[in-house]
Amino acid sequence: MIALVDCNNFYVSCERVFDPKLKNRPVVVLSNNDGCIIARSNEAKALGIKMGEPAFKIKHIIEQNNITVFSTNFSLYGDFSNRVMSILTSLASDIEIYSIDEAFLDFSIWEEKEYHKQAMYIRKIIKQRTGIPVSIGISTTKTLAKVANHVAKKSNQLGGVFILNDHTMIKRILKRFPVEKIWGIGRRSRKLLNYYGIKTALQLQNMDKTWIKKYLTIKGLQ
């Protein structure tokens, strides 16, 4: 089993560590030249602010909703990332750092009944030592772990951890999961798949492998 540990709204979370009063308030982080939105708190997302949106276009939204705006501080974010990854390295025997705020862990060293307990422990330790909240998705492949992580982030009832290892549950979730949210499906692939009527992850999973290889190449098949 593979677990994906993903820091929640990472850049925003880093800024909130130094100013706890920003909790539950809309916050955005801008690109190097303060041109575009590159990180949003959940509260900012709820206001309709999109990733990559030019800041000048939503100036009125920012002002009307008293949104806190930060310029990027990559040295700060890098320091927090190193601390999070160091903790994960100390807790897991096999770790693959995927990005500044994501890492895959090998969960096969534990028994199935231990998955949830271990994941909750990891969340607790990272939060205690860094102040950064994380979500953890656990499944049989990296792609499904990504899907599980997405579910963990979206549901307040799950406590930040979701295990996706039941065939019936996988099918039910993939049936509702937009194809463009699948790890590795970019804008061009989404348009192609939508053109052929493929709009969910389950529809893609059910496609003939020869068709997938033809239109999405061997990488898409993998």
Image (cartoon, rainbow, N blue to C red):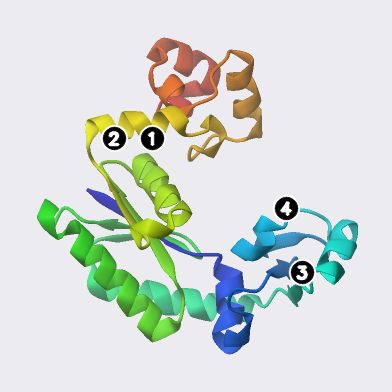
Q: Position of residue 149 (x, y in %)?
A: 40, 51
Of badges 4 and 3, the one in the foreground is 4
Residue 48 numbered tag: 4
Say what amino acid the circle numbered 4 marks.
Gly
CA separation in Å, label 4 and label 3: 22 Å
The kind of secondary structure element at disc 3 is loop
- Mark 2, Cα crowd under 10 Å, few <14 / some 14-19 / many 20+, is few
Confirm or deny contact between disc 1 and disc 2 (CB under 8 A).
yes
Is residue 217 something one can see in this rendering? yes
Closer to the chain start, of discs 2 and 4, is 4
In the image, is 100 to the left or to the right of 57?
A: left
Q: Quadrant of the C terminus?
A: top left
Amino acid type at mark 2: Met
Residue 34 in sight in this render: no
Helix, strand, or loop for circle 1? Answer: helix
Q: Which residue is mark 3?
A: 32
Q: Could you say which quadrant of the image residue 71 lies in?
A: bottom right
The answer to which of marks 1 and 4 sits earlier in the sequence is 4
> What's under tag 3, amino acid-wise?
Asn
**Number of residues whose C-alpha sits closer than 10 Å to that of mark 1, classed few (under 14), some (14–19) or many (20 or more):** some
Task: Using the image, tell me which numbered label, if any, was put on residue 173.
Answer: 1
- At a point 83% along the width and 62% down the height, the residue shown is 61
Q: Within 10 Å of the Cα at label 4, are there few (<14), some (14-19), or many (20+) other Cα atoms?
A: few
Q: Earlier in the sequence, mark 3 or mark 1?
A: 3
Height in image: 66 above or below 216? below
